[in-house]
Image (tube, rainbow, N blue to C red):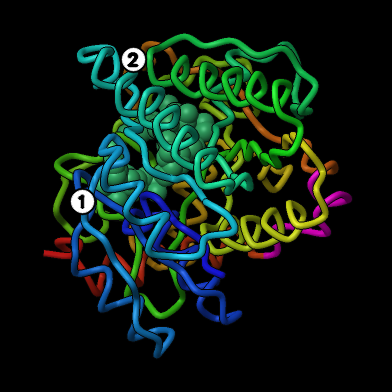
């Protein structure tokens, strides 16, 4: 039996494939390489000493999906494939809905036809919108403020309907907080195209000299020092959460939703300070205007995942900083 990993060449997917291979799970990656590079495959192999089975293709390609489900004995699917840039989703919303919502619908139809009904879906803390209080529990109300977030919410709702219509499905909706860090080998990591949108790759690109200085988006939020607070989680801890979710699906829980976060929030200034301390690199920054759509504070109550999955994030902020930096230093131009 094998696990199909859509989007397995991407940032979180590649780290999850490593962890799956290391527990001797057979994996097939399906990725259209729209936001990743084939070079990651050799890197995964160099870590695990195992061959990677890779299919270049699209979750929108129904025929391809059927042929894959015929060729391999899948018992589960981890579905990472999706577009994730919030700003871009405002500019090309239909592309986001087609890729993220229709792509998932297409995948689920094919899964159903081949009686593969165990699915782990990459959702996001963005589905909590601007929460009234923190820490955030899974039971909090959901909302979205941009097409990317709405695509995640739509998929969550579609999967809930699917489960209601056919309770033989087992579906884990994993709401990730802010993944950062990289594999400790420094060989795989996050490789954003162009200028990064997210804080951590921006910081490491300033440190390596690719960017001049960081703009801190707002210092007038109602937080510890006025800058935005997020729950940063090491990508390898996140990857382990997927292994635990797969295990859970084998016990036939039905539809389950988990926050994958650490439960600890850090401000932008705390992140800069922590990076500087961990790496000895200075990060020049300036305070600039708030970024449209940003919220003040977002961090998880991870207790439900801790209890139900027997999973906890174990890596410290220092490890996140060191591993992000090692990856950036070894690969100043990502996988190129
Ligand atoms: P990523 O872009 O690195 O990985 C996604 C992968 O999916 C890429 O390799 C891309 O080429 C592939 N892909 C996209 N559309 C595809 C399609 N139609 N068919 C086949 N492959 C396709 O992103 P990531 O950070 O690894 O995120 C993985 C998932 O987790 C995404 O669904 C994302 O929305 C979600 N997520 C990410 C974050 C984050 O901050 N990184 C937070 C919450 C949720
Ligand atoms: N920030 C800066 N300067 C930058 C980039 C970010 O000050 O150059 C600040 C932001 O204002 C925010 C914090 O750093 O306060 C984190 O920003 P990120 O862009 O790294 O992360 P977000 O929390 O805004 O968004 C991320 C993903 C979304 C996802 C969300 C919740 O990008 O896709 O986490 O999971 F929806």
Q: Position of residue 53 (x, y in %)?
A: 33, 72
Compared with residue 328, is residue 233 higher up or lower down, i.e. above or below? above
Residue positioned 49% across, 24% down in the render: 152
- Viewer-nearest of labels 2 and 1? 1
Query: Front-most of 41 and 29?
Result: 29
Residue 289, label in figure = 2
Residue 13, label in figure = none
User: Could you tell which of marks 2 and 1 lies nearer the N-terminus?
Assistant: 1
Counting every numbered tag in the picture gives 2
Q: Position of residue 293 (x, y in %)?
A: 42, 12
User: In this image, 100 relative to 128: left or right?
Assistant: left
Q: Does residue 323 show up? A: no
Q: Does residue 59 show up? A: yes
Q: Position of residue 50 (x, y in %)?
A: 40, 86
Instruction: Name the quadrant of the N terminus.
Output: bottom right
- Crowding near the residue tagged with mark 2, few <14, some 14–19, many ≥20 C-alpha atoms within 10 Å: few
Q: Is mark 1 within 8 Å of ligand 1?
A: yes
Residue positioned 32% across, 58% down in the render: 9
Secondary element type, mark 2: loop
């Amino acid at each position: 039996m094998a696990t199909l990993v859509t989007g397995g060449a991407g940032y979180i997917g590649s780290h999850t494939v490593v962890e799956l291979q290391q527990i001797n799970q057979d994996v097939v990656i399906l990725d259209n390489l729209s936001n990743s590079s084939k070079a990651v495959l050799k890197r995964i192999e160099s870590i695990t000493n195992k061959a990677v089975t890779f299919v270049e293709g699209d979750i929108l390609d129904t025929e391809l999906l059927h042929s894959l489900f015929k060729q391999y004995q899948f018992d589960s699917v981890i579905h990472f494939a999706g577009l994730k840039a919030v700003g871009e989703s405002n500019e090309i919303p239909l592309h986001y809905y087609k890729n993220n919502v229709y792509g998932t619908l297409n995948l689920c139809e094919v899964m159903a036809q081949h009686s593969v009904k165990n699915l782990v879906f990459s959702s996001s803390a963005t589905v909590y919108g601007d929460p009234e209080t923190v820490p955030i529990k899974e039971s909090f109300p959901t909302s979205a403020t941009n097409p990317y977030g709405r695509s995640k919410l739509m998929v969550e709702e579609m999967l809930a309907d699917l489960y209601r219509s056919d309770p033989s499905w087992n579906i884990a909706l994993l709401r990730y907080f802010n993944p950062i860090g990289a594999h400790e080998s420094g060989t795989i990591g996050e490789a954003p195209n162009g200028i990064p949108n997210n804080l951590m790759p921006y910081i490491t690109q300033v440190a390596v000299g690719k960017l001049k200085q960081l703009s801190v988006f707002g210092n007038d939020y109602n937080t510890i020092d006025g800058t935005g607070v997020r729950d940063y989680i090491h990508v390898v801890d996140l990857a382990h959460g997927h292994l635990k979710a797969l295990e859970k699906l084998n016990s036939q829980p039905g539809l389950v939703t988990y926050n994958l976060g650490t439960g600890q929030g850090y401000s932008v200034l705390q992140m800069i300070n922590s990076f500087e301390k961990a790496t000895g690199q200075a990060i020049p920054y300036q305070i600039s205007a708030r970024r449209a759509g940003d919220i003040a504070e977002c961090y998880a109550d991870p207790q439900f995942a801790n209890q139900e999955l027997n999973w906890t994030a174990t890596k410290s902020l220092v490890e996140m900083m060191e591993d992000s930096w090692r990856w950036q230093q070894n690969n100043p131009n990502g996988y190129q």
